[in-house]
Amino acid sequence: MPKYAYPAVFHPNADDGSITVVVPDLPGCITEGKNLADALFMAEDAVAMWLWAAENDRDSIPAPVQLPQVEAPEFVNYVCADTDEYRRKHDARAVKKTLSIPSWLNAQAEQAGINFSQVLQEGLKQRLDVQ
């Protein structure tokens, strides 16, 4: 399960109270939140999205470097990301699967109007204990 942690620079904006977040190790990974809690949430989402895209494109994942030095009111905090969790939440593409079931079971399921894809998805989620 790919999990990452990167230092991020949090820059409070005096004019409206929002907080801009920059992750120096991930080029272009910048986000903003209305307040600290929102900025932390947005930073986690931005880092996970950046890394998920890099994994999908088979790009190299940069290693986190030393904590950046900043001056108040800026501060540095680590942001964690789990790309497997992000993928589960955001990659809903359908994948075609071929499977085999007994003929008698197929006939009864079709007669009952069973949606095979839905039943398979529900069964896999239950078996894997995922939502």
Image (cartoon, helix red, strand yellow):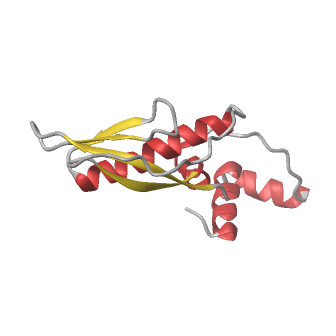
In the rendered image, is residue 19 in sight?
A: yes
Q: Residue at x 69, y 62 (%)?
A: 124
Q: Residue at x 64, y 63 (%)?
A: 125
Q: In the picture shown, does residue 127 fall above or below 52?
A: below
Answer with left or right where residue 116 lies relative to residue 86: right
Closer to us: 72 or 82: 72
In the rendered image, is residue 92 in sight?
A: no
Answer with left or right where residue 103 lies relative to residue 13: right
Q: Residue 73, percent across and down? A: 20, 48
Closer to us: 55 or 61: 61
Q: Residue at x 56, y 48 (%)?
A: 64
Image quadrant where residue 128 sits: bottom right
Q: Residue 58, percent across and down? A: 72, 34
Closer to us: 7 or 89: 7
Answer with left or right where residue 17 lies relative to residue 118: left
Figure disc tally: 0
Answer with left or right where residue 43 lies relative to residue 87: left
Q: Quadrant of the N terminus?
A: bottom right
Closer to us: 128 or 21: 21
Q: Among all residues in the image, which is located at the extreme left?
A: 15
Q: Residue 39, percent across and down? A: 30, 48
